[in-house]
Image: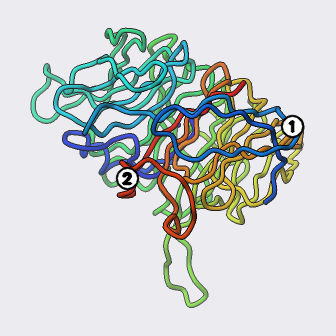
Amino acid sequence: MRSVTWRKTGKALRGGMLALALAAAFALLAGCASRLRSETVVIPDAASAASTDGIDTTFEVRSIFKVSFGERTLGYPLGWAAGGRLIGYANDTERGFVSLATPYRDPAVLSDPYIIPLGVSPDGLLLLGLAKDADAKGSAYKLKLLAADDGRDVAAIPYAALKWRKYPFTWSDNSRYLAYSVREPEASADRIEVYDAKTGGTASYEWTADTSSSAAIVSVKLSNDSAKALIVYKDDEKSQDGQLREGRSYVMLAERAGGAFESRYSHPLSGAGSADWVNDSQIVFAGADDTLFGYDARNGALTVLAEGTGLFSLSADKQTIAFSRGDDTVVAGRLQGNNVLNEAVVYQGIVPMLLAWSPDGDRLLLEGTKPPYAQERAVPAPAEDTDGRYASFVLQFR
């Protein structure tokens, strides 16, 4: 899902007609950091930023922008388009997809309000939305691809009954394959549906794994060669007395074999449920013990990359990583081999629910809410955010 990087339940779909998608949504998609020298230029309404007097300027924050969708209008960012523009949606009756250029305060309308915005492709060229199918009877819907520059229709994706589907829809890193899960009535397991944006073709695959019948896919992201799938799923667990308890999240690396994706590796995930591809053979994920792991399918090696982490996001070139540490701290670092280097605190004062790098890697989108102890700490925040609503910021690096 940015990566797509995955966010909490329903963060990409809110309000009015968007509640339809929210009901089906389950999204995806923190120690000690090195100190950095920062000359931060705070754009109006920005919250707090990390600024120290160390010598490491690898991740020096130049500007912080508070994202606004208009006075008294709630809106939520979905991801990045070309040229440093943000794509989001405004929760009103007149706009669907919107685009925000620097300083991210005056949204331009890209689509009508009758399309439910679902996301942006990693290359920032395509928008994915859900719209009612005017050519079909009853409450039928269709998936639509729109151009991110002007909102024009690009393609329609075959899509069956909405009640059978689960969110989110997730792009491969090369923006070619769109994948999502299916649970048809009376079926004992989910299936994986794939749309190929290059050919316009679709395919359906079984999901073969050693899971219970209640296991449900939260998200599925194909590798760039489409031979493997990175699956986040939830499955019930039995306590020692044999009673079922709340489902735990897992990450699974599955490989395509004929008409099925078969499990090759799985590991418990943290509550944030973060997992992503580094390349077609390596993945990164946040384990249940808040440890950031790297796994290489070629030799089965599991490596600890960082401790005390949660939600994370990889840049498009897979060389930079941002992750949460503790309740309200965001750290950035260089991903090199089996190490995270030049760690630096880049933001404090918000509990991140979404982290997403711009395609060129020089900006980081941060969305979240104030920590519960904000009243006990001197953490500056815009007056409009004192009610605890979500807030979005763009960090621009030098």
Residue 65 is tagged as: none
Up/down of 158 relative to 232, above or below: above
Is 202 displayed left or right of 350 in the figure? left
Residue found 57% across the figure and 18% down from its top: 123
Name which residue type carries label 1.
Answer: Asp
Indicate the secondary structure of the residue bearing disc 1: loop
Which of 126 and 194 lies nearest the eye of the viewer?
126
Mark positioned earlier in the residue sequence (2 or 1): 1
Q: Is residue 143 left or right of residue 348?
A: left
List the residue tagged with mark 1.
56
Residue identifier under label 2? 389
Residue 4 placement: quadrant: top right
Q: Describe the colour scheme in one phrase.
A: rainbow
Kindly identify the residue that appears in the image at 35 percent across and 22 percent down: 106
Q: What percent of the width, then of the height, locates residue 397?
A: 69, 28
Q: Amino acid at mark 2?
A: Arg
Front residue of 318/241: it is: 318
Residue that appears at 52% across and 49% down = 353
Classify 69 as above or below 231. above
Front residue of 217/121: it is 121
- In the rendered view, would you say 39 is above or below 97? below
For label 1, count other residues whose C-alpha is less than 10 Å away and answer few (under 14), some (14-19) or many (20+).
some
Q: CA distance from mark 2 to mark 1?
A: 33 Å
